[in-house]
Amino acid sequence: MERTLILVKPDGVQRGLAGEIIGRFERRGLKLVGMKFMQISQALAEQHYGVHKERPFYNDLVAYITSGPVVAMVWEGKDAINAARATMGATNPAAAAPGTIRGDLGMEIGRNLVHGSDSPQNGVKEVNLFFNADEIVDWNRGGDKWIKE
Ligand code: DAT
Ligand code: MG
């Protein structure tokens, strides 16, 4: 079972779109196993975006993700990484398909509303970076047999 770290970024929270964004993952059938409302520190942002350190937009990226609170979540499911990224849409909202979070709700790459892990390995790494083991909830979802074969 794969896990992905999903963040509703500060623009999503400030625009009052957190519920809308969370609902899309929920309706998709991904299973929520961790969630917190938090302010990302400079240090955590630098760790989280460490892979982009040499990119020209790195400073803006760190400033953006620390510019206000985020909703940090862990969603679980079969192929959760791909399913979540498909629900998010392309990185640049201007190119994202309608029906996706970014394609329906966003306009610019620097305000793309949501983060999702990009591989199972990074999913594990990012979940561990944002969540302690005791913040992950092991629970049985009543409707599981209608989502999972
Ligand atoms: P994603 O968020 O779809 O996984 P990414 O990991 O390649 O995309 O990049 C992380 C974030 O950096 C992305 O959400 C927005 C920003 N970003 C990526 N490419 C960019 C670019 N060419 N110009 C400005 N910001 C960019
Ligand atoms: Mg990424």
Image (cartoon, grey):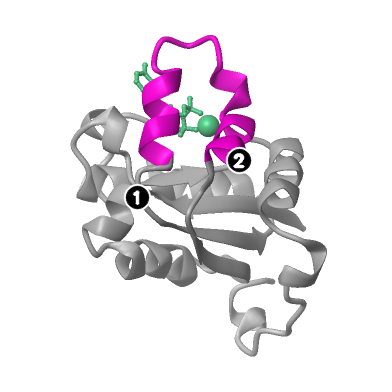
Q: Amino acid at mark 1?
A: Pro
Within the displayed image, which quadrant is ligand 1 positioned in?
top left
Q: Is mark 1 within 8 Å of ligand 1?
A: no
Whether residue 136 is visible: no
Quadrant for residue 67, please give it: top left
Disc 2 marks which residue? 44
Residue 100 image offset from top left, x and y in percent? 32, 49
Residue 13 image offset from top left, x and y in percent? 32, 59
Magenta residues (range): 42-65
- 5 with respect to 123 (left or right): left
Disc 1 marks which residue? 10
In the rendered image, the vertical position of residue 124 relative to residue 136, given as above or below: above
Whether residue 134 is visible: yes
Q: Nearer the viewer, residue 133 or 3?
A: 133
Q: Nearer the viewer, residue 45 or 2?
A: 45
Residue 78 image offset from top left, x and y in percent? 69, 57
Mark 1: which secondary structure? Answer: helix
Q: Is residue 132 magenta?
A: no
Residue 34 image offset from top left, x and y in percent? 64, 68
Disc 2 crowd, CA 10 A, few/some/many (<14, 14-19, 20+):
some
In the rendered image, the vertical position of residue 103 relative to residue 77, given as above or below: above
Q: Nearer the viewer, residue 58 or 107?
A: 58
Q: Amino acid at mark 2?
A: Leu
Q: Nearer the viewer, mark 1 or mark 2?
A: 2
- 30 with respect to 78 (left or right): left
Mark 2: which secondary structure? Answer: helix
Q: Is residue 45 magenta?
A: yes
Residue drawn at x 28%, y 37% as measured from the top left: 111
In the rendered image, the vertical position of residue 97 relative to residue 147, given as above or below: above
